[in-house]
Image (spheres, rainbow, N blue to C red):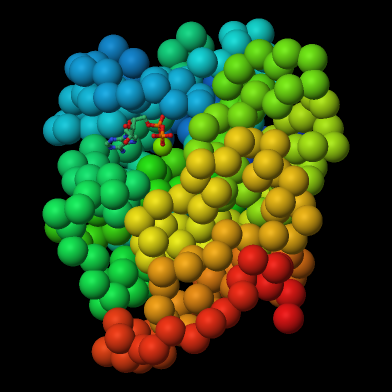
Amino acid sequence: EESQGSDKTEVADSDTLKTLQQVDSIDSDVDPMERSWPTRQNSRSSVLSEWDIPYEELEIQDLIGAGRFGRVFKGKWHGDVAIKVFNIETDNDLQLASFKTEVSMFRKTRHENLVLFMGACMKLPHLAIVTSLCKGKTLYDTVRDRRETLNMSRIVNIATQIAQGMGYLHAREILHKDLKSKNIFLENGKVVITDFGLFSVTKLIQYGERKDDTLAIPPGWLPYLAPEVITSLRATSQYTDSDLPFSQASDVYAFGTVWYELLVGDLPFKTQPAESIIWQVGKGLRQSPSNVQSRDAKDILMQCWKTQPDKRPQFSDLTQTLDRLPRKRLTRSPSTPLHLSRSAES
Ligand code: ADP
Ligand code: MG
């Protein structure tokens, strides 16, 4: 069933990642017959139409929450769904093109650890993405729930599933850009990652108005940001997504923070103000997981949190490392003093 045609599709997909202006390159997966159809004004819309959900077909129910880019509703569309409604200015063509490009990538994601993309509403003013509704708890809530017993083998199992889902995304040349425990759900032990690629759809600046030189930083965001990204935050006054050097390596850094949460039950730099976190991370300082006993577990953290992006492992390396962890020993290995506070460059 996988034909030569789908190889071309892969090429088109990596192109779409590179630049927003290349929305038209998606045309390569249009059926040639369809392409020459005389009444088609725009073959791009025909590609996307397969995933178009007419807004009228959606039954929008309760508001689940509001995030950086819009609101999330529970709804019905052939069953329970989550509907993400975007606040995109109607006159911004580039943002609209960006939205369509991202959506064209989501339809290629089929992995058991990634939320199921069902379709999107593409017609202004109703821009929305429809995914399966995650019914479990987020990892954010799970690690903070004292009733949850996260032993080491469970932690390794969760981390492995995250690394597998992320490895799949990277193999498809999709960056997550917003990997965090709030975007990871646990459903009967199964990890479901959400919100991959959505960061690009919206501008960070939408989160809040900047006042003079102060940064508008969503709470809880900085601990996931790699030093190279944090440094760019500081350097630019009017940044957009493309100014921030997100990469596979910055996704791996964010995974490191999720790993820390799994081990410690909270975020690094928890009580510190934004300026202080920015300064410390920029200087190469990292939070030390003081009460983690296992040297192997700390080692993974140090690898993911390396200052230099190219020194960090890939997700495929991480799944192997996690697999090789001696799980029994992990819980009771004698504490090896390890000075993490200075950056992990050694
Ligand atoms: P954040 O990820 O920062 O919490 P979002 O805008 O992504 O912000 O999500 C808003 C709310 O909707 C959160 O409570 C989140 O858990 C919930 N949510 C997002 N996506 C889904 C989904 N696919 N299924 C169920 N709940 C979801
Ligand atoms: Mg989210």
Asked if 32 appears above or below 50 in the picture, the reply is below
For the N terminus, the image quarter is bottom left
Residue at screen point 34% across, 47% down:
140
Query: Residue placed at 65% from the left, 24% from the top?
Result: 216
Residue 221 sits above or below residue 167 on the image? above
Q: Is residue 228 left or right of residue 264?
A: right
From the viewer's perspective, is residue 111 above or below residue 344?
A: above
Quarter of the image holding residue 195?
Answer: top left
Within the image, what quadrant is residue 80 found in? top left
Residue at (71% x, 16% y) in the render = 210
Residue 241, relative to residue 68: is it above or below?
Answer: below
195 with respect to 97 (left or right): left
Q: Nearer the viewer, residue 251 or 262?
A: 262
In terms of depth relative to the viewer, which is nearer, 271 or 192? 271
In this rendering, position of residue 227 left or right of residue 74: right
Q: Does residue 317 appear anywhere in the picture?
A: no
The x, y position of residue 17, in whole percent, is 67, 47
Residue 51, given in percent of the width and then of the height, sits at 40, 34
**The C terminus is located in which quarter?**
bottom right
Pinpoint residue 16: horizontal percent, then vertical percent. 67, 45
Q: Residue 48 at what x, y percent from top left?
A: 49, 33
Q: Which residue is drawn at the image coordinates 44% and 64% (left, top)?
A: 259
Report whether residue 268 is seen.
yes
Q: Which quarter of the frame holds ligand 1?
A: top left
Q: How many marks can you see?
A: 0
Judging depth in this view, the residue of 278 and 241 nearest the camera is: 278
